[in-house]
Image (tube, rainbow, N blue to C red):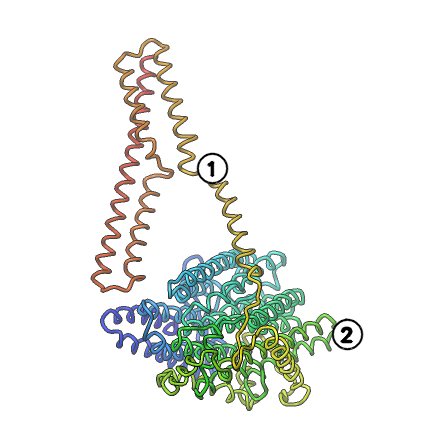
Amino acid sequence: MLFLVFFPMIAAVVSYLIGRVSKTARDLFMMLSCGVTLAAVGYFLSGVIAGQEYVSVIPGMCGFGLSFRLDGFRVLYALIGGVMWLMTALLSKQYFAHHYHNRNRYYFFFLMTLGATLGVFLSDDLFTTFIFFEIMSFTSYTWVAHDETPGAMRAAETYLAVAIIGGMVMLVGLFLLKYTVGTLAIGELHAACAAAADKTVIWAASLCILCGFGAKAGMFPMHIWLPKAHPVAPAPASALLSGILTKSGIFGVIVVSANIFREDAAWGNMLLVLALITMLGGAVLAVFSTNLKRTLACSSMSQIGFILTGIAMSCLLGHDNALAARGALLYMLNHSLFKLILFMAAGVVYMNLHKLELDDVAGFGRGKWLLHFAFLMGAVGLMGVPLFSGYVSKTLIHEGIVEYVHHLEAHGHSGAAYTVAEWVYLFSGGLTGAYMIKLYICLFWQKNKDHLTQTMFKAKNGKYMTPLSAFALTVSAVLVPLLGVKPNATMDRIADFAGGFLHAGIPAHEVHYFTWVNLKGSCISIAIGLAVYLLFIRLVLMKREGDSVTHKNLWPAKLDMEDRLYRPAINGLLAIGGVVASIGDERLLEKYVYVPVIKALVFAGTFAARVAGSLTDAVAVTASHLWLSVHRNIHHLHVGNFFTEAIGKTADAVAEGLNHTVLQEKPLRHHIAGFLAGVWEGLLNLYRAVSHTMSYALVLFAFGLLATIVYLLTY
């Protein structure tokens, strides 16, 4: 089983080395590695279906080893990961064929992230989850920064900041949880937390863990990276960021919610509020967006809210959580599939036009029937149209909300608040329909406002995709109706197979998906979507110009939470910390502590010796020379000691060497030369630090010698 986690990481190194010799061989090896990983998942899937459960442990110190498990849910998401990586690998060959640099670096981190992501989903304890979660965050950072444009670097900075802050807060929560209940094993959490006396600490730990996982999932208010990272990342990477890396965050939310707070109404209500804000906020942002990939990114934020709603309702319903929990599981699967299709379709648009603004890409899909079919499958699936797989998961979560309202009313409580939640759910589903209709009509029905551009689009018909790209899109798109036409035979069986991880109950009877009581919710959302598109998007957000239309960006820039809230808050904290830390700043210490103290001591020693009348002219000259030496060398003072200087300079040398190797795409001999040059520069810096440290030591030795002479003369 460890093969699934570590083989892609080993393959990443091999792929990088092959890429130094042959780009074609590297591309082939990269796709083959993804295929081998998927085949290995298929082997384990057959074993799990047959009733086997795979467990693997790598012992560690102080009880912190690595443990992995393969059960229904884990092997299902390993399968989803394998499929998504293989499909995006097939598209990547054409996508990166032109206008892209550092492809070797991209493929290295592409495979590294595959191994780390599988490590998250196969983890059997939260410490293992955390280790691979952090590896995944750092390796996927390079996807966002890949283009190295100012926009890409800023988005990558935001992504990394959210990942690091979320990861550190999560680590605090894990330590608290380990200290309180004595275990981080996922299968032991429920019993251990139920037996713990201090529930306050468990809540504090769980909130910290939720912060870390919620940040990766794109949950409000840690969602700020998501709408900015996707538009600048390469489209295959965006498909993975949205389709599966966000689900690694959902994985952690499920672990906490389904184990520690399995039947906790307070946790369920808190999570439901965050889910509804995430769901509605992302949908509103998507409606206003005028960029193809940004719209899909904001949509991802909204869809995460739908999934979190299912998890929250599962906590509220307790033992009766069958519909909500199974809906959350199936929504995870469906969203991964839909965003794989939609971001790959957006990638096809971008690799032909290198543009993403709706006014620039309008009309590109006219006459391109395969792209049309694939995008349409992703769109109707995301909208929850009946007979497609997205309808099933949307319906199950909606029925879970309705079920809880009936449960409250049956026990004499008001269900009004949850009726409001139900309408927020339906309205958000309607907004999903509105922005997907906007994208669909823009790409495949509207004509571009520039007639020459539209003629150029038509000339590309039949030669805008390679066979590999077409295969990846077609296979992914066909799954949407196949899974949705007979949901009892497909989706229900998947839920039965993998629902144990969410502790999902079994429905009292088979769900009749196509009865009016279940169809009603979908019909309401679709009607809301059509109304929003016709009465708001077309009338307010679009301007007709002859036969064409222009999309207007009316979203106020001042509502950007990152620029208006998070960055000012962090900068303020850094400023406060800087003032506090400056007390120990080297220059301030030198100016206000070291120099005055040494001056005072030298003056005091000299004055005392002269007062005693025993200091000869020779000693006076020596003292004068000593002072000149102190004055010359005082700027060399360093805070710390020889060992801290040595460690710091050595780390700088290694970092410089790595910067010349992994991050730059040059011939291997240049990497070796660059690495050695970086190490040599680090050693020179170390020598300079040592020489400065020795000068400081000589000053102190001279001062001690002077004090000794004064003492002997006055004894």
Q: Secondary structure at mark 1?
A: helix
**Considering only order in the chain, which callout, 1 or 2, is on the residue closer to the N terminus?**
2
- Mark 2 against mark 1, which lies toward the viewer? 1
Q: Is residue 392 left or right of residue 590?
A: right
Q: Residue furthest right?
A: 412
In this view, the residue in front, 699 or 378, is 378
In this view, the residue in front, 224 or 261, is 224
Q: What type is the residue that disc 1 sits on?
A: Ile
Q: Secondary structure at mark 2?
A: loop
Measured in 3D between alpha carbons, the distance from the residue under mark 2 to the one under mark 1, in whole angstroms, is 62 Å
Examine the image and state in which quarter residue 599 appears.
top left
- In which quadrant of the rendered image does the C terminus lie? top left
Kindly identify which residue carries mark 2. 411
Residue 302 — which label?
none
Kindly identify which residue carries mark 1. 583
Residue 292 locus on image (x, y percent): 48, 74
Vertical placement of residue 153 versus 378, above or below: above
Within 10 angstroms of label 1, few (less than 14), some, or many (20 or more) residues?
few
Residue 626 locus on image (x, y percent): 29, 23
- In which quadrant of the rendered image does the N terminus lie? bottom left
Is any atom of residue 50 visible in this view?
no
Examine the image and state in which quarter residue 396 appears.
bottom right
Q: Is residue 337 left or right of residue 387?
A: left
Q: Residue at x 52, y 48 (%)?
A: 573
Residue 564 locus on image (x, y percent): 55, 56
Is any atom of residue 495 visible in this view?
yes
